[in-house]
Image (spheres, grey):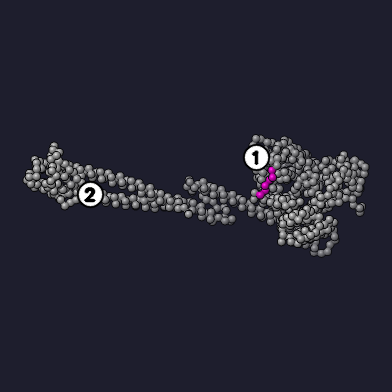
Amino acid sequence: MKLLIVEDEPKTGHSLQQGLGEAGFAVELAADGTTGERLALEGDHDLLILDVMLPGRDGWQILHSLRQAGRDMPVLFLTARDAVEDRVHGLELGADDYLVKPFAFAELLARVRTLLRRGQTTAAETFLQAADLELDLLRRRVRRGGRRIDLTPQEFALLELLLRRRGEVLPKSLIAAEVWDMHFDSGTNVVEVAIRRLRTKIDDDFAPPLIHTVRGLGYVLEVRAAP
Amino acid sequence: MRPLSLGARLSLLFAACSAAVSLLAGALFNQASEAHFAELDYQQLQGELTVLRNLLDGVADGADLPGRLPAVQEELALHPELALRIAGSDGLVWFDSRPERRDPAAYRSLEASLEPRRANGARLTLHLNIAHHRHFLDDMQRLIWLGVGLSALATALLGAWGVRRSLRPLRQMGEVAAGISASSLTTRLEEARQPAELAELAQAFNAMLARLEDAFARLSAFSGDIAHELRTPLSNLLTQTQVILARPRALEDYRETLHSNLEELQRLAQMVADMLLLAKADHGLLLPSREPLELGVELDALLDYFAPLAEDAEVRLERRGEARLAADRGMLRRALSNLLDNALRFTPAGGTIRLEVTSTADCLRLEVGNSGPAIPAEQLPKLFDRFYRADPARREGRGEHAGLGLALIRSIVRAHGGEIRCESVEGWTRFILEFPA
């Protein structure tokens, strides 16, 4: 997957490039609007990360010329102000998502993956699996090591999210938004508690553990090689 | 064009009034005097007529006249202001004491028959010189005009002085207002010393100053608090980073420090986001997109969200009542989730948190109540102040909202046209949100 970042603040730009690069993306970085626009029009990027305030051409203008040229790759805006007008303006121009600075990198990564996934038509999965953990979406049943595990609806939804996006570090804010539809950083440790309770049910009596905490970033469900 | 000053306007008005009044009085007096003089003159003429008729009694034609003339002349000599003309019935002038006269305006005349009973006989015409009356009246008119002018001038001056004096409190207000700066917001006008008409203005002025003072004090405190709140995490970050960089360390130490820094940074980011939201609310830019919400459903969703936390804390969550409210779902969830988070923090194990919705014709009431120690009454009004913490020693702690949580909630509620307050009695604390229906 090829990404283009247009960001004039060098530290932010390089951190994003490094972070997204390490997450497995091929990342190109442009430090001003004019270069960014040229690269975006010439290249074949799967997704664009655009800062709104840029020297040369600003984010809106780049987006505008992209859409005029018939390029419809998803665009994620970064803005320093969460002014309503900005949001509305961005959506009118066809931005797909936006993040207000300062944002957590884990959040950006999760949003990028969501946007990239949006285009793909995935066959409706009815069965999710990781190691010996099985999730039957139709009958809403969970088994691990052949043993049936009872989960509350919330726990089921949480596990489903972790399984669908296994291997991805999911920030708490994303989990709260996806599972409980809470779209704000509430500052509570609801997610922590919910994860801990889910863990006691699916990980405590089994090996290897599947749900891992990535400190400071979020949670990930993956099968890790035993240390 | 700039309108005339109040002083000038009132002075002119006063002057015009007094001029009109004195002019009217003068005109009436003038007329009365003239009538009076005319009356006097008429009486004098009548008197003279009688005397002359007596002197001329029996004169039938011009030939009889010379014999009587000395007596007539004598009589006329006594009255130099008087002129006499005697004419026959044929119009022939028999006698004229002063033929050279005649500025008709200077004389008042009386014409009558010589004999009272013979209307067609000889005729007497008496001319009374009334020049002195005229002079008197002319003088009087001059005096009247002078009086009019002087009184107008005097009232104008008096008016100007009075207006200037009466408006002095206004000028003082202006001076006070001009002298007010951020550091002198404690200045007040003395309301008791203001005239009744200005008392209200002075009161309003003082009230405005009080509001400004209060807002400014809050703002100053807020900026001070911001600085303090930022300083603590920043100093943590600086110290930790510098210490860890001072010498080579194990990889694990670096990782640990970065994690710790990350936590501080997240707190800082959250604080900045909260403060921006508050600033937006202050500028009236927090515009909720209203959609009709079933509060029952909304509250249940929130309780679902908090259920694991509550179970852990052994706190029971309840909801009562439902209603429909047009509100911004995101904002409302944020506000209520902050309230619930607070409530969970202060509810002891075994306690209860209850969400209750009641609605009347004109008001929708949403209560978030929890059992637990009561909040002291004197703290209640301050709860919603920014950076206010009931316990000043607890600057850090679990509150990720750094004392901004309740201020945020209030801003959200107010953006919806509602109001929030807190009541705390006998082990039950409740936050009451009221929205106009």
Q: Residue furthest bottom?
A: B247
**Disc on the earlier residue, 2 or 1:** 2
- Classify A81 as above or below B424: below
Q: Please report the bounds of the magenta region as a residue range.
A: B285-290
Foreground pick, A223 / B343? A223
Where residue B357 sits, quadrant-wise, is top right
Residue lying at 29% horizontally and 52% vertically, measured from the top left:
B142
Crowdedness near tag 2: few (<14), some (14–19) or many (≥20) residues, C-alpha within 10 Å? few
Q: Residue B406: x percent and y percent?
A: 69, 46
Q: Can residue B376 be seen?
A: no
For disc 1, the chain is: B
Foreground pick, A44 / B12? A44
Residue of label 1: B436
Q: Give yes or no for residue B304 being in the magenta stretch.
A: no
Crowdedness near tag 1: few (<14), some (14–19) or many (≥20) residues, C-alpha within 10 Å? some
Foreground pick, A150 / B41? B41
Q: Which mark is residue B164?
A: none
Q: Is residue A217 left or right of residue B9?
A: right
Q: Is residue B233 left or right of residue B178?
A: right
Q: Give yes or no for residue B286 being in the magenta stretch.
A: yes
Foreground pick, A193 / B69? B69
Residue lying at 80% horizontally and 61% vertically, measured from the top left:
B244
Q: Residue B41: x percent and y percent?
A: 20, 44
Q: Which mark is residue B105?
A: 2
Residue lying at 82% horizontally and 53% vertically, measured from the top left:
A215
